[in-house]
Image (cartoon, rainbow, N blue to C red):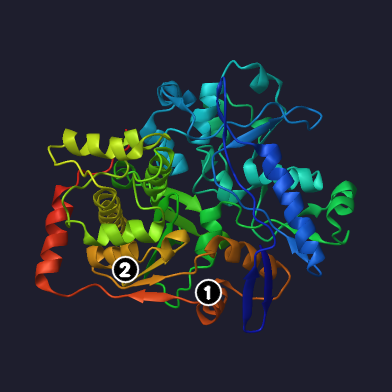
Amino acid sequence: MLGRVGPGTLDLTEAHRFPNTPVRLPDGLRWDVLGLYRGVLDGLRAAARSGGVASVGVDTWGVDYGLLDADGALLGVPYHYRDARTEGAAEAVWARVGPAEMYRVTGLQHLPFNTVFQLAAATGSTQLAAAGTLLLMPDLMVHWLTGTLGAEETNASTTGLFDARAGTWSTELLGRLGVDAGLLPPLRSPGDPAGELLPHVVEFTGLDARTRVTTVASHDTASAVVAVPATAPDFAYLSCGTWSLAGLELDGPVLTEESRAANFTNERGVDGTVRFLRNIMGLWLLEECRRAWASQGQGQAPSGLPDLLAAAARAEPFAALVDPDAPEFLAPGDMPERIRAHCRGSGQRAPESPGAVVRCVLESLALAHRRTLRQAAELAGREITRVHLVGGGARNELLCQWTADATGLPVAAGPVEATALGNVLVQARAAGLVGDLPSTRRLVAATQPLRHYVPRKDPAGRAAWDAAAARIEPSPRNP
């Protein structure tokens, strides 16, 4: 994405788009990291052809990493967080540091694929034994562009090795878990310079050798939160795509036992803020349903998302509900059948038609949004008066309206490309083009299209959502 920032101006242009398709190897699910890097280079070359580029920033998802040897060469193909290798890894970690003690240090939600558990699963491997440096995915891309080594702090905070209070790597945890502290590079903050483009990158892309590489909020959700168009502090955010990340922006972490039991995470944001949130499975469920229907051939389901959503709107309300965070929904597979099995296992009538399945997914997500935001407000002692829903889910009108209805709060949907905008805005701020976080968000609100959804006020509708919420089992608690 190519961004342009100036007084009263903030826009994005798509320079290049490329797929991100994991590869199943004999020993597990991996990222096609070289294909991704080639996509980055092709994108930079396309951006260079469109005009002057002042700065480059990289963001990706969290937790996954590549290992480099002492010479800086990549050791193997990075694992995908949905790979099953981490099954049982948490118990090995907790034998050294218990889950409650880990939470008091890291404030991190228990997810089976957190980096700390991936490292536990890799214990004894020849690659880990030979590694000199661990780089999270955006830092790996920056390394290949610049040759420098660093760990951006918003992504570092997703590893389970980061001290949520101190904002540093936890040397105590590293020692007790037997993780070599030398594996982890120095931390960088959003806005820090990350280095200069290597000569062969300049030659291939056509970028000016003076083009800066700027450290951004390299966890995609952290970048998305930068671009939340909030004009008052009493907001909650939903960064909604494959995952739904629902929470609050705070000045400091919430490390209470109640927060741990509710499985909330404290991840770093820009300017030392904390993203107090919970990961919800999100539109992954819908994506996997569509993939399953497509693989079954024509006639199994409506061909496009608009038709599926129209069928969902016509389906019976609240006929079946699931907990989106149930572990059987994590891995790729036949999601419609998994949803039906989940419903049968909880004594509900299984949804049969595609429209009924999609309605089940979207109503269940809206109820998960409600539950999570209410818990976040209670745990943090905050009042929420408005929800900002950003990311690809902002295009889903049913999900936006049902989230407003379920929460009883107005929902402002957009921008869809919040992550890319947040990335660009951190670069612009480093260049002195925008000011502090509130003024940055005012610029987003003034320049980006938003859609507003008001909760329906009829008592019967509110009662129906309340009754549906009472049927949903709580999300899995932290151990």
In the picture, measured across the screen, residue 291 lies left or right of residue 220, that is left
Could you say where residue 223 lies in the image, as x and y percent from the top left? Answer: 56, 59
- Label annotation for residue 441: 1
In the rendered image, the vertical position of residue 121 relative to residue 194, given as above or below: above
Residue in view at x 57 percent, y 20 percent: 26
In the rendered image, the vertical position of residue 186 relative to residue 369, given as above or below: above
Tell me if I can see residue 247 in this picture. no
| Position of the C terminus by quadrant | top left
Q: Amino acid at mark 1?
A: Arg
Could you say where residue 278 lies in the image, as x and y percent from the top left? Answer: 38, 50
Residue in view at x 49 percent, y 49 percent: 165
| Position of the N terminus by quadrant | bottom right
Q: Where does label 2 land, which residue?
A: 384
In the foreground, 92 or 327: 327
In the foreground, 22 or 306: 306
Query: Which of pointers 2 and 1 lies earlier in the amino acid sequence?
Result: 2
Residue in view at x 43 percent, y 27 percent: 97
**Residue situated furthest bottom in the rendering:** 8
**Residue 63: quadrant of the picture:** top right
Spatial distance from mark 2 to mark 1, Cα to Cα?
Answer: 18 Å
In the rendered image, the vertical position of residue 438 relative to residue 279, given as above or below: below
Q: Amino acid at mark 2?
A: Ile
Could you say where residue 316 lies in the image, as x and y percent from the top left? Answer: 17, 56
Residue in view at x 38 percent, y 32 percent: 99
Tell me if I can see residue 329 in this picture. yes
Q: Residues within 10 Å of mark 1 (few under 14, many from 20)?
A: many
